Amino acid sequence: MDSRGCRDFGGYGNQSQAQLASPEFNSHLDFIRELYVKNTIALDDGKDVFVKVGKQQVVWGRTDLFRVLDVLNPVDYSRNNIYDELSEIRIPMWMLQTDIAWAKRFHAGS
């Protein structure tokens, strides 16, 4: 039993008032919604490499009802309603995103 007369479940549910009021301020840095650095690197052969690293949402496809392709970021239904926009309830993850543009660049006036 704890000081309140409740059974102690190994610390589960033993949160302070500040932790209950602001759960996003935790060791996972959930208060940082998205934080990333991005850059496009032009290669000598005319290809472009796009690099983005940090806490971000990566969306591979768009859909209105089912998440078939958009499965990299998990969805948090605990704090939000299931009818909220997906961009608001996706959990941003720490990841690296790279894209390579294989098409040659054409410069006007060359």
Image: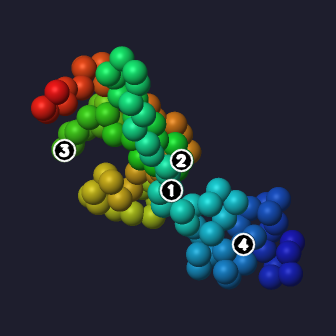
Residue 25 image offset from top left, x and y in percent: 63, 69
- The residue carrying mark 2 is 54
Viewer-side label of 1, 3 = 1
- The residue carrying mark 3 is 64
Residue 100 image offset from top left, x and y in percent: 37, 25
Q: Secondary structure at mark 1?
A: strand
Single out the residue that lies furthest toward the front.
110
Mark 3, other Cα within 10 Å: few <14 / some 14–19 / many ≥20 = few
The amino acid pointed to by label 1 is: Leu
Tag 2 or tag 1, which sits nearer the N-term? 1
Q: Do the numbered discs 1 and 2 sit on residues whose CB atoms are within 8 Å?
A: yes
Task: State the residue at coordinates (40%, 21%).
Answer: 44
Give the answer, above or below, for where 9 lies relative to 16.
Answer: above
Tag 3 or tag 1, which sits nearer the N-term? 1
Q: In this rendering, would 40 be left or right of 109?
A: right
The amino acid pointed to by label 3 is: Asp
- The residue carrying mark 1 is 35
Task: State the residue at coordinates (19%, 30%).
Answer: 107
